Amino acid sequence: MPVWTLFGLTRPVASTRWPGEGGDDGQAGVQGMPRYHADKCDNGCRECVAACLPGALTRKAGDEARLNMDYGRCIACQMCVEVCPTGAMETSRDWAFAVRDREDLKWQEALQTPPAQALKARVEGAFRNSLYIRHVDAGSCNGCESELQALNNPFYNLHRLGIFFTPSPRFADVLLVTGSGTYAMRDVLQATYEAMPEPKWVMAMGTCAVSGGIAAGGYSSGHGLEGVLPVDVWLPGCPPNPAAIIHALLMLLGRAPQRVRGGRCE
C-alpha cells in the first residue's frame, strides 16, 4: 500500500462541513472589505480618497459631505482604514460580497426595498442538484485562479456541493470570468458565451472582472465585464477567497442568501 494512501486512511475526513451548520469556512482572521461609518466621517477630510489606488472612494462633485464608496472597485488593501483619522473606515471580516445587482456594491444612504428575486426563480426552475462552470481568464494576474484551484482541494471539496468545472462551454451552465476583460479577449468571451446552451449565466469574479480594478480604463482593457456580457452575479475581491466564491455560486443557485445590499453587509 502506498504511503500516501495509508496516511489518508489514518486521518479523519478533511473536508469542511461548511456551509452546513457548524462547518469551518476556513477564513479565520481574514480581513474583508472595510466598513464605512458615514456618521464618523469628517466632511472636509480627503485622506481615504487620496490613499485609494483603485478609486473605490470618491467625493461627490459639489458635495464635500458626501463620500461615495464602490465595493466593486475595492481591493481590500485596508489603506483607507490605516489613514482614516476618525474611524469612519473600519476593518471587518465581511468577505461574502456577491450580489446580483451591480448597484448593490455601491454604498447608499438609505437602503431600498430589494427587487423581486427573478433570477432566483429562473435558476431554481432550471437547475436541480448540479452546476457546471466554464472558467475563462480574460486578463487576470492569476490571483483569482489560485483561489479557484483551492476549491477542489480536500478542505473545500467543491464537488460535494454538486458544482463542477468543465473544459467545454457546450456543457457549461455558468461562464465564470476572471480578469479585467482585455480587448483582446472580448471576442473569445463572446464566442464562449454563445457556445453555451440555454439557460446560461455569467459570473464576474474578482474586482478586475467587476470594474476593471486598478487597470480600469488602461490601453488594453475597459472596465471589467459591464457592457461586455450580461452578468448575473458580481463578486469583487482581490482576489475573493474560496469561501466567498462558494457563497456566490450557492447564491446563484438560490441555496444561500445575498448578504450585501446598498453597499452594506448584513
Image: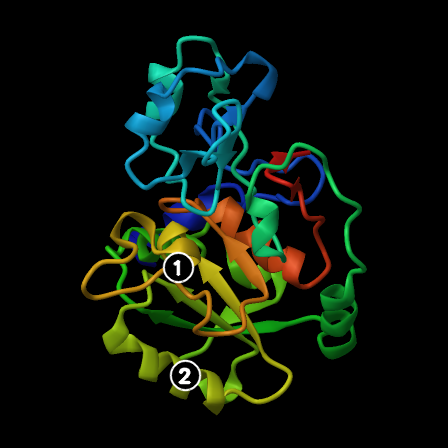
The residue closer to the viewer here, 150 or 261, is 261
Mark 2: which amino acid? Answer: Gln
| Residue 45 point in image, percent of width and height | 40, 16
**Amino acid found under the numbered disc labelled 1:** Ala
Category of crowding for the residue at label 2, using alpha-carbon neighbours closer than 10 angstroms: few (below 14), some (14–19), many (at least 20): few
> Of 68 and 170, which appears nearest the observer?
68
How far apart are the two marked residues, 2 and 1, measured between alpha carbons?
15 Å
For the point 44% across and 28% down, which residue is it? 31
Q: In this view, does 68 lie above or below 203?
A: above
Query: Which residue corresponds to the image point at 33% horizontal and 67% vertical from the top-left?
Result: 181
As drawn, 77 above or below 153: above
Q: Is residue 156 visible?
A: no
Residue 177 image position (x, y, % from top left): 41, 67
Lower position in the chain sequence, tag 2 or tag 1: 2
Marks 2 and 1: CB-CB under 8 Å?
no
Q: Position of residue 159 (x, y in %)?
A: 54, 63
Residue behind mark 2:
190
Q: Give left or right: position of 220 versus 39.
A: left
Q: Is residue 109 above or below residue 230?
A: above
Q: Mark 1 points at which residue?
A: 209
For the point 60% across and 72% down, the residue is 131
Which secondary structure lies at badge 2? helix
Q: Nearer the viewer, residue 30 or 180?
A: 180
**Element carrying mark 1:** helix
